[in-house]
Image (cartoon, grey):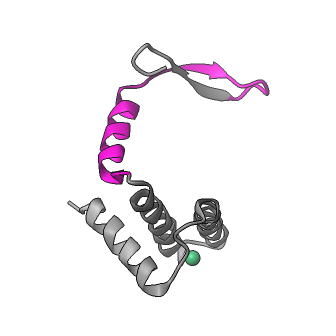
Amino acid sequence: MIDLKKLQKEVMRNKVEKGFNLTDTALEFCRAHEELSEAFSKFNKGKDGVAEEFADVMIFILGMCENMGFDLEKELVRKIKINKNRKYKKGKSPDGKDIFIRIKTKLDP
Ligand SMILES: [Mg+2]
């Protein structure tokens, strides 16, 4: 299994070495979003380059996690477990489409 904490540190090491942004968190969110938009743009033409843009998104997220002291691997495992245990009911959107509505619980409000 990949060690995301190790990747977080590697991403941060590269950012420091290259002199990339370390202090403007809002910019990092924008750059991650920009990379996701690039992935979508490429996806609209096919699959070429989409995975690389996803990697760019992850690199920004890994960097932000390291900068903010988050353990992304731990958070991913925790959140995937929460999502796995979530219950949904079928419903209708205002325009009549079938949708899933999450059933909120005390443990997962
Ligand atoms: Mg890119």
74 falls in the magenta region: yes
Q: Quadrant of residue 94?
A: top right
Against 43, residue 29 (above or below) is: above
Against 86, residue 76 (above or below) is: below
48 falls in the magenta region: no
Which of the two residues, 17 or 61, is positioned nearer the viewer here? 17
Residue drawn at (39%, 73%) of the image: 11
Q: Quadrant of residue 21?
A: bottom right
In percent of width and height, residue 79 lies at 38, 38
In percent of width and height, residue 66 lies at 39, 61
In percent of width and height, residue 71 lies at 33, 51
Which of the two residues, 45 or 5, is positioned nearer the viewer here? 5
Quarter of the image with the N terminus is bottom left
Which of the two residues, 69 or 82, is positioned nearer the viewer here? 69
Against 18, residue 37 (above or below) is: above
Residue drawn at (65%, 65%) of the image: 37
Left or right relative to 99: residue 87: left
Left or right relative to 84: residue 95: right
In percent of width and height, residue 64 lies at 47, 60
Against 90, residue 35 (above or below) is: below
Number of marks drawn:
0
| Direction front: furthest residue | 23
| Direction left: furthest residue | 1
Residue drawn at (50%, 83%) of the image: 19
| Direction top: furthest residue | 106
Which of the two residues, 51 or 24, is positioned nearer the viewer here? 24
Please provide the residue range marked out in magenta: 70-97
Residue drawn at (24%, 63%) of the image: 2
